[in-house]
Image: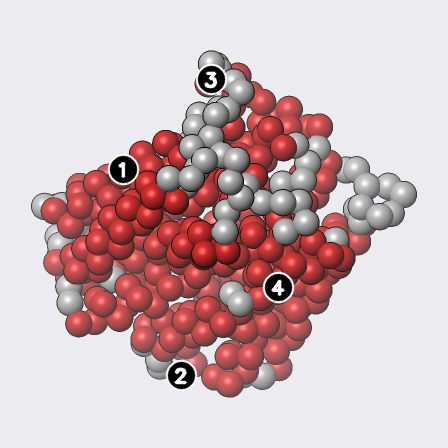
Amino acid sequence: MCTDSEELSSVKILILAIICCIVVANIYFNQSVLNLIASYFPNEWKAVSLIPMATQLGYAAGLFLLIPLGDYIERQRLILRQAQVLFLALIGMILSPTASVLVFFSFLTGIAATVAQQIVPLAASLSKSSSRGKTVGTVMSGVLAGILAGRAIGGFIGEYFDWRGVFLSGAVMTLLAIFFIARILPSQSLPTPKFNYLTVLRSLGQLWKNEPQLRNATLIQALLFASFSILWTALPFWLDYRYHYGTGITGSLAALGLIGILCAPLAGSISDRQGPFRMVILGIVLMLLAWIVFWGWNSIAGMVVGILLLDAGEQCVLIANQHTIYSLCLEARNRLNTLFMCIMFIGGACGSLTATWLWETTHNWMLIVAAGAGLVMLGMLIAIRYNPSSPQTGT
């Protein structure tokens, strides 16, 4: 085990990114095998339909309730305990006798999977300011890879094994992650061993009130993640409606997004050198171009190009915005991350709800595209209006 005086090496940073990928993938495995679970529990469709929502609600609860603790409790110990709970939750899913029990363990999986958001600020705190953006970009690329790989890998394993095999693979990988967490993460001595938990939660409101750059970065990210979620929620419906393609094609397109993840470390490095604002604008432009491609190029080739642009743009903005918030209040990095990620995922949930409602009521792809592009343009207006280099930067 290393100590808190050591800086993370590039190898350890890469391992942390892989750990984040493993952890986050566990959240999205159920989306790929929901039909298999429904077939296994044919009389419990209502409970089965709650499984993805339970996981997301658990993740949101974990972000709000657990991430702030990283500013007060030794992070290595907290990360290790959360990973152990995640492993036990996955074992619970494998052994679940009913869909209702599966819903409970899905919620617990979501809570524990927020360990990835404990690792990101830890990696930032162990990096030099000159390389912090690159470090955050590399670790966050693992988080983003988990979002995309969870759907693709879950679908592949589920096709050849049953749904329990998917969660078993997640449990095995999580056990491997626990081994590396115990080996490579530093033990840090935090200056405030005693704290009041309710005071910690109240401090979130103070941070939001006192940090205009946090508000701006978070609102921009929420809008863009909503746009991102609109695509991935509506895409399976559109591919089935227009081309009669199954979930395998959707999984393959999700795997394509892994190519865009290569942009994350590059975005972090550019943010270190040029500042995050330029990277935010570049990412927004890429996302807007993606929606233009979706509007005018109605083919699988167009989908491929648009997805690559959208994923690359989303990651550029995400890394740049995290670069901004991690530079604001060094002793509150976990709480800053709590606010940022909570509101970002609320934006994503709203985007998914919007896509579902638009598709159910209209079956119109162009309205889906218009909604996604409109959110990106609104994000651009906020970014330009509150450019930190302009005379007026607050909200």
Mark 4 or mark 1: whose residue is earlier in sequence:
1
Real-space CA distance between mark 4 and mark 1, rounded to the nearest whole angstrom: 33 Å
When asked about the image quadrant of residue 274, the answer is: bottom right
Marker disc for residue 266: 4
For residue 146, side relative to residue 68 (left or right) = left
Q: Nearer the viewer, mark 3 or mark 2?
A: 3
Give coordinates of residue 157: x percent, y percent: 23, 67
When asked about the image quadrant of residue 42, the answer is: bottom left
Judge the density around disc 4: few (<14), some (14-19), many (≥20) Cα neighbours within 10 Å: some
Q: Are marks 1 and 2 in contact (CB under 8 Å)?
A: no
What secondary structure is found at the residue carrying circle 1?
A: helix
When asked about the image quadrant of residue 374, the answer is: bottom right
Q: Amino acid at mark 1?
A: Val
Q: Give the residue displayed 31% in from the left and 34% down from the top.
A: 81
Real-space CA distance between mark 2 and mark 4, rounded to the nearest whole angstrom: 35 Å
Give coordinates of residue 54: x percent, y percent: 32, 43
Real-space CA distance between mark 4 and mark 3, rounded to the nearest whole angstrom: 37 Å
Give coordinates of residue 385: x percent, y percent: 81, 49
Mark 4 or mark 3: whose residue is earlier in sequence:
3
Q: Residue beneath label 2, please?
A: 243
Real-space CA distance between mark 3 and mark 1, rounded to the nearest whole angstrom: 23 Å
Judge the density around disc 3: few (<14), some (14-19), many (≥20) Cα neighbours within 10 Å: few
Q: Nearer the viewer, residue 217 or 238?
A: 217
Q: Amino acid at mark 4?
A: Leu
Q: Give the residue displayed 13% in from the left and 45% down from the top.
A: 96
Marker disc for residue 60: none
| Number of dots carrying numbers | 4
